[in-house]
Image (tube, rainbow, N blue to C red):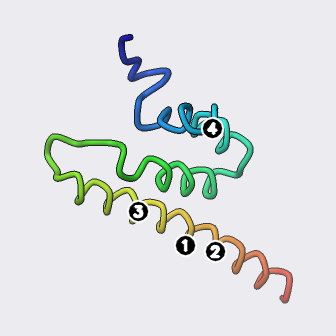
Amino acid sequence: MSTDNVNHPKHYTWLTDICGIEVIDITRHMDFDLGNAIKYILRSGHKTDAAMSDKDKTIEDLKKARWYIDDKIKMLENEINKTKC
């Protein structure tokens, strides 16, 4: 079976064997920041980059997830602060 890096890349389809869903099946029901955080968490350890070690790529993906979580927190905090004014 050939790999489809556009429609079904392996680093997003590895869940299919475990529970029958792809990462997009989860993230499409979330807002942008949370969907991206989950995407990076679920692909960590599954996507490779020729310029990086597997460990460094995993760390990069987890840092990206953290960035999106921090962004969501900032947005919510700003929303709360706006309602207090």
Which residue position holds label 2?
73
CA separation, marks 1 and 4?
Answer: 29 Å
Q: Position of residue 49 (x, y in %)?
A: 22, 42
Upstream in sequence: badge 3 or badge 2: 3
| Residue at 61% across, 57% down | 33
Q: Looking at the image, is 52 positioned above or below residue 18?
A: below
> Residue 33 versus residue 13: which sits nearer the camera?
13
Q: Amino acid at mark 3?
A: Leu
The residue at 42%/28% (across/down) is 9
Residue visible at 64% across and 51% down? 32
**Above or below, comparing residue 1 to residue 7 in the picture:** above
Q: Which residue is mark 1?
A: 70
Rendered residue at 38%/23% (across/down): 5
Alpha carbon of mark 3 to alpha carbon of mark 2: how far? 17 Å
Q: Are marks 1 and 2 in contact (CB under 8 Å)?
A: yes
Residue beneath label 4, please? 19
**For the residue marked with disc 1, what is the amino acid?**
Asp
